[in-house]
Amino acid sequence: MRLSDSKYIDQVIEIIDYDFGIYYFLDDIIVSEMHEGITFNWACAEKVIADAKRILGEDCRPHYISNRIHEYYTVSQDWLKFFNNRYFLKSFSVITSHPSGMMNLIFERMFYRRKIFQVASIHEAFQHIKELQQEKTN
């Protein structure tokens, strides 16, 4: 399910349709839906990071949901560039059922230094973030 077809669409602050995918910026969450067949690399990430800082604030540390509704590829080792530039996420959730999405996830886990949560739906991803936020306040 696309975020635009979910009950969470009314929480979106801004939508940006890049040439590589659609990004939804919410208050403390970024949701990506990549286009079919693209390769997501550091050049793509830099564009998203610049817009996230503009929309969410210079020091933003959002929750990130990768809604993998299409098959695409990632340059997994580019996560090292992400961390070397001192960017951080509060959480990283992946929604995927495609075989290529599973392969991307396996490689990303090798380079992403924190836990990647695999979830089955948009709703489950938002519920997971809600639980993390509640844990933080307790």
Image: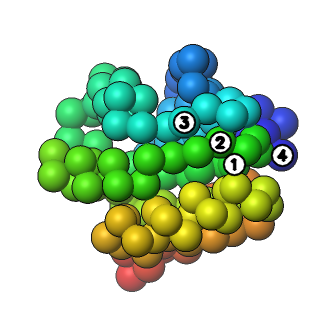
The correct choice, above or below, for 55 with respect to 94 in the image is above
Q: Marks 2 and 1, Cα distance to the nearest angstrom?
A: 8 Å
Q: Residues within 10 Å of mark 4 (few under 14, many from 20)?
A: few
Pinpoint residue 116: horizontal percent, then vertical percent.
49, 70
Query: How many numbered discs?
Result: 4
Horizontal arrangement in the rendering, residue 59 relative to residue 49 (left or right): left
Q: Marks 4 and 3, Cα distance to the nearest angstrom?
A: 21 Å
Between disc 1 and disc 3, whose residue precedes? 3
- Tell me if label 2 and label 3 are in contact, CB under 8 Å: yes
Between disc 4 and disc 3, whose residue precedes? 4
Between disc 1 and disc 4, whose residue precedes? 4
For image coordinates 44% across by 47% down, the residue present is 75
Residue where numbered disc 2 is placed: 72
Where, by quadrant of the figure, is residue 18 drawn? top right
- Tell me if label 1 and label 4 are in contact, CB under 8 Å: no
Residue where numbered disc 3 is placed: 39
Where, by quadrant of the figure, is residue 24 drawn? top right
Pinpoint residue 110: horizontal percent, then vertical percent.
40, 71
For image coordinates 58% across by 40% down, the residue present is 32
Pinpoint residue 62: horizontal percent, then vertical percent.
39, 49
Circle number at residue 1: 4
Pinpoint residue 15: horizontal percent, then vertical percent.
58, 23
Q: Nearer the viewer, mark 4 or mark 2?
A: 2
Element carrying mark 4: loop
